[in-house]
Amino acid sequence: MALSEKWGPPLLWYYLRQPSFRKDAETHMTGAVGQRRVPRIFLENHSIGLPPLAEQRRIVAKLDSLTARIARARAELERVQVLKAHLRQQALRSCFADLEKHELPLGELLRGIEAGKNMRCVERPPVAGEKGVVKVSAVTWGHFDTTQTKTLPNDYLPPTKARIMKGDLLISRANTLELVGATVIVDVQPDNIFLSDKILRLLVEEDKKSWVLWYLRSPEGRSQIESLATGNQLSMRNISQAALRA
């Protein structure tokens, strides 16, 4: 049985992309890590089941159709994410509009601001029995990510008050201009995870905690944070505790 001149190349392309073929090819790779390659003899000796020409045409047409549908679905999902972010910002802008008469410094709502220390750590999450320190990426994307941590030295005993607890209102004091001031409320109890010097805990009354969170995420809150952040590089801006209180 021969490959169709028209349908053979796309059929072969789809075949070579299937997981089973790629997994088999990986087991025959040669060379060092970073420069691994599939030997020519593997490709030359690999047998392929070849259907009649009409079946080749049908398979390629079906795969083309499914691929196009997947591409359209992916584009729609990306559009939904953009629309979701836009609608959220519109809702926040509407909720916090016309509050100029009621504005007051954040410091008047806070009972305090707490931070951890800048420590040399092992660049991996802690395992059982170890203690970890939170990274700025743990609060970057709108929720507290317990996997974004580093392991503290075994001989360092962090202060108990620096331990992150469920319900804490956390904010990053350092990141890019778009992400500095990212704020979350911890919704799970992490195991032995402590504040770092770049993640601050805002101490505020429980009934005002969610209000502060959403205001700091609103366009008005973000505008103030970005205007108060300092630093010469867009890749790393800082906002001080004094600026947050103001």
Image (cartoon, helix red, strand yellow):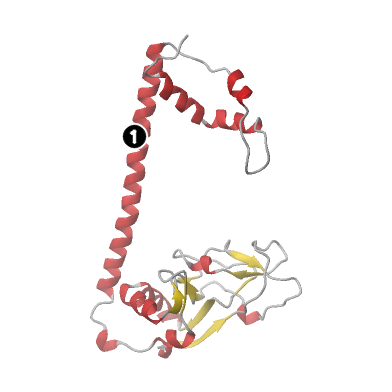
Residue type, mark 1 in image: Ala
Q: Give x and y (percent) for residue 245.
A: 43, 87
Q: Give x and y (percent) for residue 6.
A: 37, 18
Number of marks: 1
- Tell whether 178 sits left or right of 134: left
Q: Give the residue at mark 1.
A: 68
What residue is rendered at 52% in x and 65% in y?
A: 137
The crowd level at tag 1 (other Cα within 10 Å; few <14, some 14-19, many 20+) is: few
- Single out the residue that lies furthest toward the left: 98
- Tell whether 51 sits left or right of 57: right
In the image, 193 versus 53, the foreground residue is 53
Quadrant holding the C terminus: bottom left
Q: For residue 121, say whether it is visible.
A: yes
- Single out the residue that lies furthest toward the top: 1
In terms of secondary structure, where does tag 1 sit?
helix
Determine whether 167 is above or below 59 in the image: below
Tell me which corner region of the image, top left, top right, bottom left or bottom right, holds residue 189.
bottom right
- Single out the residue that lies furthest toward the right: 155
In the image, 120 versus 186, the foreground residue is 120
What residue is rendered at 35% in x and 77% in y?
A: 221
What residue is rendered at 36% in x and 28% in y?
A: 64
Tell me which corner region of the image, top left, top right, bottom left or bottom right, holds residue 10.
top left
- Tell whether 121 sits left or right of 241: right
What residue is rendered at 68% in x and 65% in y?
A: 122
In the image, 207 versus 114, the foreground residue is 114
Q: Give x and y (percent) for residue 58.
A: 37, 19
Q: Give x and y (percent) for residue 75.
A: 33, 45
Determine whether 5 is above or below 139 in the image: above
Q: For residue 187, say whether it is visible.
A: no
